[in-house]
Image (cartoon, grey):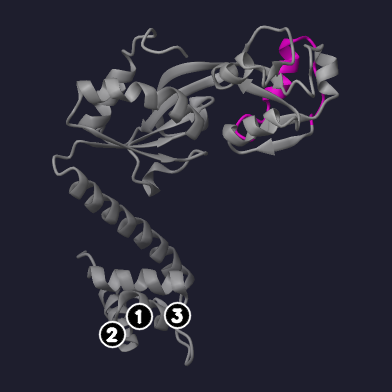
């Protein structure tokens, strides 16, 4: 089957997203009658009715709305591919989804070494906090925290294990406390590690029931909450090292840091691995531990 004209697909996507032919025409800089002709040509091309006939409103059938969602993904990918081609006509671009705190404190400081070894590859990074469907995104790979099995349909490369401990402002915890005393204080949670506190108490031999407290979606805001005395936070050691050294945060427990989980690079199994991603995987697999402290 021949592909429909791109102008007709754009009209369909705009109608579905904006809800009216008038608004679609304004966005596409066309007349409303021109948009209607494009939509009619698409219907003729597909050989099926895609509109619910109404004298006042042009509405898509439920099946056509699903089709428009797929068209939107395809158009977005075409736009992203065109942008990548303009930025790097050689095709040496790597599109990477990162977790913000890990990306800034671990990956970005190491990237100059990758750039020196592969000057022909451009690494483009965007933040994603949760696993996503690679088929609907333009990323080649992503940084993932936790078990790689939680991201089905991917291959993975282990990166580093995260070690952490409870910390709090001196005004809240002037000296280390026993686990039972910590449990009675306000606890701060990170949404990407919902069982972190329960696991920490288990490792201390002090199992706890459900633990309440304020939750945050990023380490940066969680850290600020701990610094302002809002509660005790279970944070990675490398994220709190400077504040602990300066006395802005205190270790809330004398226990040694515990493993909080592991970071992985993940990429879709069903796609061929592009050369830029293969070079990145090989580089990550051979990073010297002495390059930078973790």
Relative to residue 289, is residue 276 drawn left or right? left
Q: Is residue 49 among the parts visible in the rendering?
A: no
Determine which of the numbered discs, if any, sits on residue 34 in the image: 2
Q: Is residue 200 above or below residue 222?
A: above
Marks 1 and 2 close (CB-CB < 8 Å):
yes
Q: CA distance from mark 3 to mark 2?
A: 14 Å
Q: Give the dominant element type of the magenta stretch: helix, strand or loop.
A: loop
| Residue at figure coordinates x 29%, y 51% from the top left | 80
Work out how far the residue at label 1 is from the one at label 3, CA to CA, in angstroms.
Answer: 9 Å
**x 33%, y 19%: residue:** 284
The extreme front residue here reads: 246
Determine if the magenta segment contains residue 202.
Answer: yes
- Residue 137 shown in magenta: no
Image quarter hosting the N terminus: bottom left
* Residue 44 screen position, x and y as percent: 27, 79
Tell which tag, 1 or 3, sits nearer the viewer.
Answer: 1
Residue located beneath label 1 in the image: 25
| Magenta highlight range | 191-211
Q: Nearer the viewer, residue 182 or 266?
A: 182
Which residue has dot 3 on it? Answer: 20
Earlier in the chain: of badge 3 and badge 2, it is 3
């Amino acid at each position: 089957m021949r592909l429909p004209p791109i102008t007709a697909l754009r009209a369909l996507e705009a109608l579905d997203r904006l809800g009216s032919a008038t608004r679609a025409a304004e966005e596409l800089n066309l007349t409303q009658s021109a948009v209607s002709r494009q939509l009619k040509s698409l219907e003729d091309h597909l050989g099926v009715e895609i509109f619910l006939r109404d004298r006042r409103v042009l509405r898509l059938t439920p099946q056509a709305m699903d089709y428009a969602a797929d068209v939107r993904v395809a158009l977005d990918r075409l736009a992203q591919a065109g942008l990548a081609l303009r930025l790097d006509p050689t095709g040496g671009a790597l599109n990477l989804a990162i977790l913000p705190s890990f990306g800034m404190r671990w990956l970005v400081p190491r990237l100059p070494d990758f750039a020196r070894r592969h000057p022909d590859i451009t690494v483009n990074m965007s933040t994603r906090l949760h696993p996503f469907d690679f088929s609907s995104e333009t990323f080649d790979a992503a940084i993932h925290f936790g078990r790689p099995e939680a991201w089905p349909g991917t291959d993975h490369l282990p990166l580093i294990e995260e070690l952490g401990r409870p910390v709090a402002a001196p005004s809240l915890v002037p000296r280390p406390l026993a686990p039972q005393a910590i449990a009675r204080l306000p606890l701060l949670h990170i949404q990407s590690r919902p069982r972190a506190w329960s696991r920490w108490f288990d490792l201390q031999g002090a199992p706890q029931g459900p633990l309440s407290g304020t939750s945050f979606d990023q380490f940066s805001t969680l850290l600020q909450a701990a610094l302002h005395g809002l509660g005790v936070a279970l944070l990675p050691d490398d994220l709190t090292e400077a504040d602990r050294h300066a006395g802005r945060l205190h270790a809330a427990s004398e226990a040694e840091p515990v493993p909080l989980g592991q970071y992985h690079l993940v990429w879709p199994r069903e796609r061929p691995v592009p050369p830029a991603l293969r070079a990145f995987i090989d580089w990550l697999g051979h990073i010297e531990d002495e390059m930078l402290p973790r």
